[in-house]
Amino acid sequence: MHGSAMMHIGTLLVIFLHYDLMCSLKDDVKRITAKEGNTVTLQPEVHALEIDAQILWSFNQNSKDPKIVNSQVFKGEINTEYSGRLKDRLLLDRNTGSLTIRNITTRESGIYRLHIISERISYWHFNCTVYAPVSAPNISRGHSHSNTKTAKSRTWSGAETQSSSNTSCQVLCSAKNDRQVSLSWFRANQLISQTSSPDVNTTLSLRLDIDEKDNTVYSCVSANPVSNDTTYLNITVMCMNQKDPSMSKRQYPIFLLPLGLSATIAIVAVGMCVKKKREYNISRSTGGHPSD
Ligand SMILES: *[C@@H]1O[C@H](CO)[C@@H](O)[C@H](O)[C@H]1NC(C)=O
Ligand SMILES: *[C@@H]1O[C@H](CO)[C@@H](O)[C@H](O)[C@H]1NC(C)=O
Ligand SMILES: *[C@@H]1O[C@H](CO)[C@@H](O)[C@H](O)[C@H]1NC(C)=O
Ligand SMILES: *[C@@H]1O[C@H](CO)[C@@H](O)[C@H](O)[C@H]1NC(C)=O
Ligand SMILES: *[C@@H]1O[C@H](CO)[C@@H](O)[C@H](O)[C@H]1NC(C)=O
Ligand SMILES: *[C@@H]1O[C@H](CO)[C@@H](O)[C@H](O)[C@H]1NC(C)=O
Ligand SMILES: *[C@@H]1O[C@H](CO)[C@@H](O)[C@H](O)[C@H]1NC(C)=O
């Protein structure tokens, strides 16, 4: 009895695996995009589901144990088994065949297959991609070394007088990379630069050269298909105190000031001494005469 039921299931498995191969030629994949931690429902378009149909859900066919749901009616009783790592977060709707996954994680990205077996076998598959929310962009000061380069290029462009009055400032926006993350600079809601990388282990970063006196709103945005995060640039904080090499050179005379002052005093003192000595000599030579 139990054995014959197993054989029956075995035959069906052979049938639907074969059916799989035939179907994969005319692939009809439903794309699902989900945010980590959310609840996702994989919904086949089923019109009328036979009350005694067997419903099978599997995840990542090539894994060791792809079966995640097996629901069948035996002697008028519904028996639904959930299995695998996902089992505590799954819920099958027997009326529609749809599967709900609670608190989905990025590891649950992949192909979900559904087979509904009644008088005939119906087959669906879903390509589910789960994204973690993007990390917030971080704005920091650019390197002063690159700052010098910027100043030079400005000089080359011939705007020497302007570059001495305008202070350029370099800032760097960075964010942790992940699947399909892009990092962008916006100037008053207008995209001015963007970067992305297929290497998920890197940090994305994007430089920006701005004028210290520019009062436009700049923002750096990290985004993926399910989320985005914005950090606004505070030019006052990032640029006003930025150490510019030409600025520190200009500070040298201030440090030399006490030295210069004492040198002046010394010169004046020496001068006064010489003058006094001269006066003394004069008074001595003139004063000597009356006594003579
Ligand atoms: C969702 O799953 C994560 C681990 O994957 C866990 O830390 C968190 O507590 C879960 N949240 C809920 C609401 O179950
Ligand atoms: C699933 O979708 C992702 C992108 O959304 C794609 O890179 C991947 O190749 C798809 N997988 C299959 C088996 O279709
Ligand atoms: C942003 O970058 C600065 C400098 O690299 C670092 O000190 C700070 O901790 C970072 N902040 C965040 C939120 O990553
Ligand atoms: C200096 O600032 C003015 C006004 O903001 C701008 O028109 C000019 O292009 C700037 N010059 C340089 C060299 O950035
Ligand atoms: C990213 O880093 C992880 C662990 O550090 C490693 O297993 C994986 O192969 C790396 N991926 C790439 C594309 O370098
Ligand atoms: C950021 O996400 C919001 C919804 O959360 C969306 O309206 C907006 O268009 C997104 N912005 C970008 C630049 O992707
Ligand atoms: C920039 O930061 C300063 C100091 O924290 C603050 O006073 C100022 O309001 C900020 N400006 C903007 C545009 O947020």
Image (cartoon, rainbow, N blue to C red):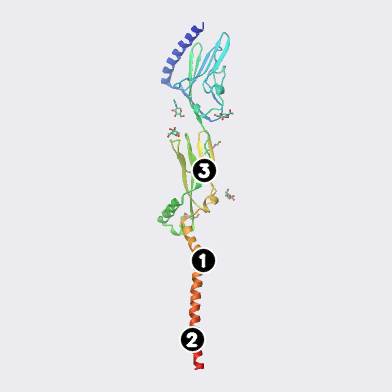
Q: Could you say which quadrant of the image residue 78 lies in?
A: top right
Badge 3 marks a residue whose secondary structure is strand
Closer-to-camera residue (70/280): 280
Q: Are marks 1 and 2 in contact (CB under 8 Å)?
A: no
Badge 1 marks a residue whose secondary structure is helix
Question: Residue 93: where, in percent of width, then height?
Answer: 57, 19
Q: Are marks 3 and 2 in contact (CB under 8 Å)?
A: no
Graded by Cα atoms within 10 Å as few (under 14), some (14 to 19) or many (20 or more), the crowding at tag 2 reads few
Count the numbered circles shown.
Answer: 3
The quarter of the rendering in which ligand 5 is drawn is top left
Task: Pick whichever of labels 3 and 1 is earlier in the sequence.
Answer: 3
Residue name at image x 50 percent, y 84 percent: 280
Q: Are marks 3 and 1 in contact (CB under 8 Å)?
A: no
Three-letter amino acid code at the position of disc 3:
Asn
Graded by Cα atoms within 10 Å as few (under 14), some (14 to 19) or many (20 or more), the crowding at tag 3 reads some
Closer-to-camera residue (143/289): 289
Question: Residue 211: where, in percent of width, then height?
Answer: 49, 52
Task: Pick whichever of labels 1 and 2 is earlier in the sequence.
Answer: 1
Instruction: Find the distance from the CA under tag 3 to the CA under tag 2.
Output: 77 Å
The residue identified by callout 1 is 258
The residue identified by callout 3 is 138
* Distance from mark 2 CB to nearest ligand 4 atom below 8 Å: no
Instruction: Find the distance from the CA under tag 3 to the CA under tag 1.
Output: 42 Å
Task: Pick whichever of labels 3 and 2 is earlier in the sequence.
Answer: 3
| Position above or below: 137 against 153 | above
Instruction: Find the distance from the CA under tag 1 to the CA under tag 2.
Output: 36 Å
Residue 282 badge: 2
Question: Residue 234: where, in percent of width, then height?
Answer: 55, 48
Closer-to-camera residue (271/127): 271
